[in-house]
Amino acid sequence: MSPIPVEITAPNLEYRLLLPVLLIFAGACIGVLVEAILTRSHRNTVQLVVTFASLGGALISTVLNWRTQDEAITAVGSIAIDGPTYFIWTILLVFSAASFLLFAERKVENGASVFAAQAAAVPGTIAEREAVEARMEHTEVYPLALFALSGMMLFPASNDLITMFVALEILSLPLYLLCGLARRRRLLSQESSLKYFLLGALSSAFFLYGAALLYGYAGSFDLSAIDEAVRASPQQPSLLLAGVALIGMGLLFKFGAVPFHSWTPDVYVGAPTPVTAFMAACTKIAAIGALLRVFYVALGADRWDWQPLMAIVAVATMAVGSVLAITQTDVKRMLAYSSIAHAGFIMTAFVGAFQATTGSSAGSLTSISSILFYLVAYGAATVGAFALLTAIRDPSGEATPLSSWVGLGRRSPTAAVVFSLFMLSFAGIPLTSGFIGKWAVFAAAWSGGARWLVVVAVVISVVAAFFYIRVIVLMFFADPAAVAPQILRPGWTTQVVVGLGVVATVAFGVFPGPLLDLAQHAGEMLR
Amino acid sequence: MEMGFPILTVLALLPAVGAVSLIFLRGALAKQVALAVSVLALLLAVILAMQFDIGGGMQFSEQAPWIAPLGAYYALGLDGIGLTLVLLVAIVTPVVIMASWRDLDAAALASAERAPTSEERALSLSQARAAGPSTGGGRDLLKGLGRDPLRGSGSTLAPRYGLHVFFGLVLAVESCALFLFLATDVFLFYVFFEVILIPMYFLIGGFGPGHGRTYAAAKFLIFGLLGGFVMLASVIGLYVQSARVGEPSYLLSTLSSLPLGTDAGRWLFVGFMFAFAIKAPMVPLHTWLPDAAEESSPGGAVMMVGVMDKIGTFGMIRFCLGLFPEASQWATPVVLALAVISIIYGAILAIGSRNMMRFIAYTSISHFGFIVLGIFAFTTQSMVGSTLYMLNHGLSTAALFVVAGYLIRRRGSRDIHAYGGVERTAPVLAGLLLFAGLSTLSLPGLSSFVSEFMVLAGTFTRHPVHATVSTLAIVLAALYILIMYQRTMTGAVQPERPVRVRDVSSRERLAMAPLVLLIVVLGVFPKPMLAVIEPAVSVLMQHVGVTDPQPRVTAEGGR
């Protein structure tokens, strides 16, 4: 620990390494300016250009930095740019880009966006109708989503708890707003927004309190300083344990793990589907990234304390997600529970904590690398599935009840086959990326000594497979419903997303080698 | 054919290519392409068999790194045991395609769906009435007729998809099965072990004749996935063990010399064995098979029982014994006990079955018991017998399902009691059924006899009690086959069921011909197959570290 500097010097920022986050942040700020300056008719196009330009720039600079293998803890020790960070940034940018392509979908709503015409208008009022007739729309969604994305990128890269908290808030606040912006079923959407906000604020408070307790214990917010303090003291005082528990709660909430999962189904259902896709893929990536960083870097030496607890959480998450998913009658809700179950599967590797510090040999599959691969597999199937969901509609909007998907295989074989592919990937059937992901996280868990957890996980996998298969049965083997939903041909943006999801799911299922290699080389965090 | 030509890949991939091409074909062309592809695969398999060097160990090997971080290779190879099963798959698939040739034709479907004539109305009503008070075996009837006694003849549901899908799925199953029997990499094997469930699932659920098909298909899939995922844990465990020693590798050749601790070996063994016991299937993990067989089309049932279930017993030999020799011996008492229970239980339930497909499924459970018994008796004779039994069981079950399918197509009912006196109007059909039945009950002179005898004789040298109890099943087999034959074929043509049963057509005879021929030839002259299998078994015995208890009893005893 360094003494407090007497005179304040300007921090030395390595702009090149931080460029991706800065670009996204700048893109968001420009987006706000666009809203203020341009007339409504031009906004949408310009916003799209700004959004994808900043995404592209960020992606390019991330990849370039990654190729030079510059790894550093920068920004006065508050941001760690290392292998996992690069990997996570890359996939965050890719999945965000895919989600934003869904934001741009206009065909399924007859030329309007899928977001509310005017969020401030009370649902069902004349003001709302006027807004719809005036073809108003919220192009603010793009800067909002970019702000969230910049927070998501910062979150898993933060090397101290304060930066992490700030990142948590940056990623959360725009998401609360985005959740309430659905064009259809607006009350549901607003309800989900409020729920997410209240619970999210509560979890942020937990996180902050935990950070404060850890500061009290270690005398620093710095992750490596906390690590040193844990190693130095032979006993774990209650301050540390309480701090770990509270920080864990805050992070597990964002990750959607049981028992902090209850917001997930409601929010996923209420939010506009593109936002749901964004949240389901990207928030989860950011949250597990942060979870890994805090628990492996700062609390790695204390893992005998948190591993048993996290193992219980992992089992509960897998079990609750899988079992409750069986009872769902709504596709979106089912996917929400499925995301909970997948959070549990990811946690098996997290609990295994198979890292260089815990005895993994160089080049073997560590917990982090297996999770990174899993995130790609899961993200591809998730974004793809939600994208497809937007195209299957009845007069009230998206046809999410499972009953209206009955017999889809007859009416639209392509859509049904593609959706089945995503379901098979979720279920972990070989030759899809989901299988390799499952294999990887279970292998990491086993290597880390959590053998019993793997056995429990494979048994729960059967339960999980059951409800994915059930969707396939409904689509292919059941007779079509009387009131069948319409399958729209969505705009090219959505089609591209579905196509990419299919390609990624199959390619990383059949030839996962290069990606696994990449994940393996990104398998250790700087401390 | 020169060295280095990837003939195994070509063989296994050929049906898959055929299956994909069927997506774009319709009608008669689809059937012709499917048949051509399967015959071509058969030709390739025969060429392989001719080139096969007896005693040459694993041959035609191909190996390429597939997923380096996982240590997974694309590795294929063929030994005597593999060749036996490859031949089985290659022979059975064209038979299935020929036997199912007209099943899905528009005309055939129209007749199945046609409005019932007044005669048939009376008939099905009387059937429904007869089924009403009965219990047990009558469950099947109730299922089919109870809900809607007036629906068509025997209430056959239409297939959900066109014929090109059916033949495509059959070819897909063939391709997966070939990969499974050729894989010399555990990961590759596992991949196809799971993937084969998908086409099989659609084959059952999409083309079964009854209302229970969706349920049966789902049950099949859940059991399959349960086994698969439990095995996944063991597959991962193998990786972890292998990565601990050095570079991880899933190659059989590397893994078989991997030093496993006793405990680790046993745990991993249990995972594999559980999956194979579901697939084989052994009591008490067998319950999916009767349901799935009952609800699938005859062609689908052949692919499932005749081909796919062999993966279980094959896996026991190649992976349980090959990778975990110590654990295999450790588990022997339990496995043998379950095998004997399967033998007797399957036979007894077969006697009590009224549904023809269910009946064949139970006979198979009994026969799979024999195969497992022979494998885990650890004598050269019994193991060779078991391997040969896999081939013979595949042939005779295929024959039985195919003939049963002919019969069912003619009358629309799967109830054994719905028939009687068929041999008067359809003597050839009756003859074929009798032949398939006799092969199933292991009549001397037919192929099953050789293998069953070898299994029992080999087992007797080490486990006399097990062998003696299992012998009982020979009597039971005679009972169930002959009772079934008597009920369906002999006796008077029952006056209340006057529909005349047509005899088999020449196309149907042609489909059965290879099966009949092989059953007879292998029954009289099993030497070529035994010669192919024996070296592979000796290698395995050495690997497991057991020797025959009485050296003078060898495979020669089977002749």
Image (tube, coloured by chain):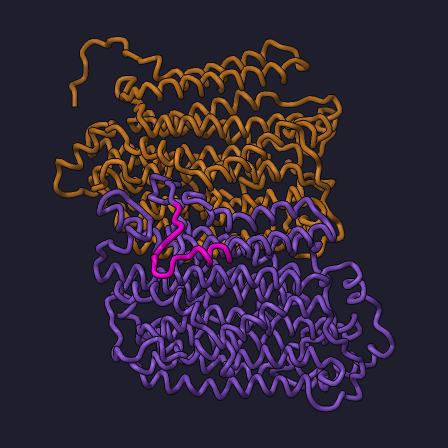
Quarter holding the C terminus of chain B? bottom left
The relative height of residue B440 versus residue A457 in the rendered view (above or below) is below
Q: Quarter-wise, where is residue B409 in the image? A: bottom right
In depth, the one of A453 and B360 nearer the eye is B360
Q: Position of residue B177 (x, y in %)?
A: 50, 57
In the rendered image, residue A195 lying in the magenta stretch gets the answer no
Residue at the extreme right: B118
Q: Quarter-wise, where is residue A436 in the image? A: top left
Left or right, residue B253 beside residue B83: left
Q: Which chain is purple?
A: B
In the rendered image, residue B61 lying in the magenta stretch gets the answer yes
In depth, the one of B239 and B395 nearer the eye is B395
Left or right, residue A70 beside residue B277: left
The relative height of residue B348 versus residue A289 in the rendered view (above or below) is below
In depth, the one of B536 and A146 nearer the eye is B536
Left or right, residue B450 beside residue B96: left
Residue at the extreme bottom: B491
Q: Position of residue A258 (x, y in %)?
A: 41, 48
Q: Position of residue B333 (x, y in %)?
A: 30, 76
Q: Quarter-wise, where is residue B4 in the image? A: top left
The magenta segment: B46-62
In depth, the one of B154 and B395 nearer the eye is B395
**In the rendered picture of this protein, how many numbered marks are placed on residues?**
0
Q: Is residue A310 among the parts visible in the rendering?
A: no
Q: Is residue A204 among the parts visible in the rendering?
A: yes
Q: Position of residue A526 (x, y in %)?
A: 26, 28
Q: Which chain is orange?
A: A
Left or right, residue A52 beside residue A169: right
Q: Name the residue located 64 percent from the left edge and 30 percent from the top edge.
A: A114
